[in-house]
Image (cartoon, rainbow, N blue to C red):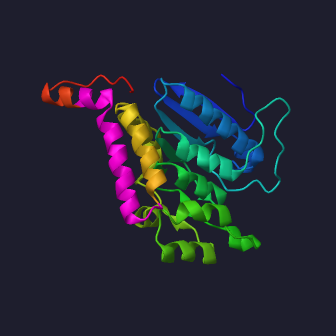
């Protein structure tokens, strides 16, 4: 397994865990970290045994945002990458990514969190687009946040830089679940293994269709999804799932 300078990669059965690992700097996201995450995701995508990704931060912070110091990629490591390349890689993975938010998710860190498919957060975590306080604007992560949160709440966050608590984040759709910090590991692991128990082939087609159809006009979207439904119905996993349901047994997925 590749050793990285800014992230940790661990495997637990079908679940890969990626940890932003610069807690002394509040887990910033710069070109080196983006490059390492892109490299790790490519390896996960190529490994059929890995079905789900959990993304978290070391220490007490998920990520405080962009790396203003812009640390260079270490010699011999994966090439640096942009946030654009990272977010595209996340949506092209074809495997569910669950953010396990242990603490503040701010600025670019919030965008990285929202780019995950599902989010489980500690109920003590805070969330915000704080860039305006230093004379910046959350340009890149606008593409992620506006696809999850309404316009008024998004603009309130961006214009004021105010941090939301977990209850507010849950209410506006930034996160899926808020749990006590002591329960965060268990709740995230339970969700990850629940997802790993589903058909990987159906989830891959479904995730790609979800993201690719999001900005289509209504009728073209329906026609695209109709074709994708045909691809799902042709899967061996679909036949197995139906047979298992009728036979009242647990399905055995082949991933195709």
**Quick check: 179 left or right of 236?**
right
Q: Which stretch did the figure color magenta?
A: 215-241
Point out residue 5 in the picture as x, y percentages from the top left corner: 75, 34
Residue 120 appears anywhere in the view: yes
**Quick check: 27 left or right of 148?**
right
Residue occupying image coordinates x 55% and y 34%: 17
Residue 61 appears anywhere in the view: no
Residue occupying image coordinates x 57% and y 68%: 163
Number of numbered markers: 0
**Quick check: 50 left or right of 89?**
left
In the image, residue 101 lies in the stretch drawn in magenta: no
Point out residue 107 in the picture as x, y percentages from the top left corner: 65, 61
- Taking depth in this image into account, of 160 and 186 the one nearest to the observer is 160
Point out residue 109 in the picture as x, y percentages from the top left corner: 63, 55
In the image, residue 227 lies in the stretch drawn in magenta: yes
Residue occupying image coordinates x 60% and y 43%: 89
């Amino acid at each position: 397994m590749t050793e990285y300078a800014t992230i940790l990669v661990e495997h637990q059965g079908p679940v890969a865990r990626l940890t932003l690992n610069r807690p002394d700097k509040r887990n910033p996201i710069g070109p080196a970290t983006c490059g390492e995450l892109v490299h790790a995701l490519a390896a996960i995508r190529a490994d059929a045994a890995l079905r789900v990704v959990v993304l978290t931060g070391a220490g007490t912070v998920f990520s405080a945002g962009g790396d203003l110091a812009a640390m260079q990629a270490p010699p011999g490591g994966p090439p640096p990458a942009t946030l654009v390349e990272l977010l595209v890689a996340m949506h092209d993975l074809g495997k569910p990514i669950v953010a396990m938010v242990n603490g503040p998710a701010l600025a670019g860190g919030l965008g990285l969190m929202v780019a995950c498919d599902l989010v489980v957060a500690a109920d003590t975590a805070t969330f915000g687009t704080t860039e305006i306080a230093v004379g910046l604007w959350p340009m890149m992560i606008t593409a992620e946040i506006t696809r999850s949160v309404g316009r008024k709440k998004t603009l309130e966050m961006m214009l004021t830089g105010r941090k939301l608590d977990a209850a507010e984040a849950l209410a506006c759709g930034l996160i899926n679940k808020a749990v006590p910090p002591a329960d965060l590991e268990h709740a995230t692991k339970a969700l990850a293994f629940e997802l790993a128990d589903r058909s990987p082939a159906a989830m891959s087609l479904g995730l790609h269709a979800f993201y690719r159809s999001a900005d289509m006009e209504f009728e073209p979207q329906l026609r695209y999804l109709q074709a994708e439904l045909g691809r799902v119905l042709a899967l061996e996993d679909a036949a197995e799932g139906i047979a298992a349901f009728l036979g009242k047994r647990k399905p055995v997925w082949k991933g195709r």
